[in-house]
Image (tube, coloured by chain):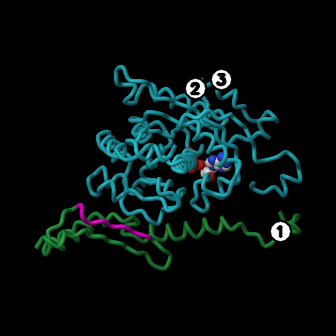
Amino acid sequence: MTTDLKEKAPLGRVIVITSGKGGVGKTTSSAAISAGLAKQGFKTVVIDFDVGLRNLDMTMGCERRVVFDFINVIQGDARLKQALIRDKRLDTLSILPTSQTRDKNALTKEGVEKVLDELKQEFDYIICDSPAGIEHGAQMAMHFADEAVVVTNPEVSSVRDSDRVLGLLSSQTKRAETKDSEPVKAQVLITRHDPVRVESGEMMTVEDVLEILAVPLLGVIPESQAILKASNTGTPVVLDQPSVAGRAYEDAVSRLVGNDVEMRIEGERRPGLLHRIFGRAS
Amino acid sequence: MSIFSFARRPRRPKSAETAKNRLQILLAHERSGGGGKQPDYLPMLQRDIVEAIRKHVAIKETDVDIRMERGDEMSSLEINIELPGATTP
Ligand SMILES: Nc1ncnc2c1ncn2[C@@H]1O[C@H](COP(=O)(O)OP(=O)(O)O)[C@@H](O)[C@H]1O
Ligand SMILES: [Mg+2]
């Protein structure tokens, strides 16, 4: 399957990872999803749209190799090829880091579109890691998307913000503005899900969240120690040692590319007391 | 935590140590760069290099490629310049 793909023209599919609320797991998910796609043989690039903060390079473990960035390319100070960082673990994976010194206004619609168009010539999947909020930066990240992964924690403010983002996706994007074009295909990815707290009634269930948001479910990622460990070392969780969270991301990636994968909702934490004291990341 | 000292093997999690090191290296560079900024001088450096070489050889702006790898002891800058083929004067 992967060998076939290499012969064909690239898919050039733009997917935004967005949420509204900050700290829900967009950057973690962008890293895991892009690495998961690249692992399956798809040529993938992940772009950091969080101008001024820049965290994706740290999460991907390439922070020491940043020379030029997305904004340099938009402003014509560097060519796209120079700014792209080729991942050292997967040769199908590239990272386009962002600038830490500019502000979000450096992202112009024309500039972003030009870069995306150029990336579409070479990559199957273009993953856009959105900043938090619903302002300019987040709107630039979603504007040219074909698909959206709305990262949501089973928690009230996160679900509420996801709902607002879904509204923007269906009204403020290029697809929404273009007559006769399909709407952005949006799916929800529930992250930091804790089965123990769901069971005790402290956390909304997956069904609760889906009932409110009324969009298809891409996957459920458990609250996991493996995520912290992976981010410490700058490794996308799907490239780290096997973990429940890594598996959940791999399943989500398979669904994203159109495979029918049974939804399993697993947790890392088990209820037993001894387990809680001595529990280790799986 | 100290109640469980019997469980406190010499096990400072290795990944936390890695996280700290990575941050120290990165932040040292971020704080020291001119005005606390990242390598904004690189586009200028690239332009200067192209100009300097053009005094001797005809190259395009796109023939220069700059890569960097930051380390704790030292950083390296890798500059690749594609020169025209041997047939060109
Ligand atoms: N499934 C998870 N389990 C545990 N911690 C997580 C999980 N997902 C994300 N995190 C942690 O939450 C924090 C915020 O995640 P991040 O991906 O940076 O969010 P965002 O990009 O939405 O602001 C990080 O410290 C990250 O390690
Ligand atoms: Mg982020």
Pointer 1 residue = B8
Residue drawn 25% across the image and 68% down it: B82
Q: Callout 3 environment at 10 Å: few (<14), some (14 to 19), or many (20+)?
A: few
Q: Quadrant of residue A159?
A: top right
Question: In the rendered view, does A190 fall on the left or right side of A7?
Answer: right
Q: Is residue B68 inside the magenta stretch?
A: yes
Residue drawn 48% across the image and 74% down it: B71
As drawn, the residue found furthest toward the left would be B89
Pointer 2 residue = A215
Choose mark 1 or mark 2, whichever is in front.
2
Residue drawn 10% across the image and 73% down it: B89
From the top left corner, tell me how far across and down residue A251 is, in percent. Answer: 63, 41
Question: In the rendered view, does A92 fall on the left or right side of A200?
Answer: left
Q: Secondary structure at mark 1?
A: loop
As drawn, the residue found furthest toward the top would be A180
From the top left corner, tell me how far across and down residue B41 is, in percent. Answer: 31, 66
What color was chain B assigned in the picture? green
Q: Secondary structure at mark 3?
A: helix
Residue drawn 82% across the image and 36% down it: A200
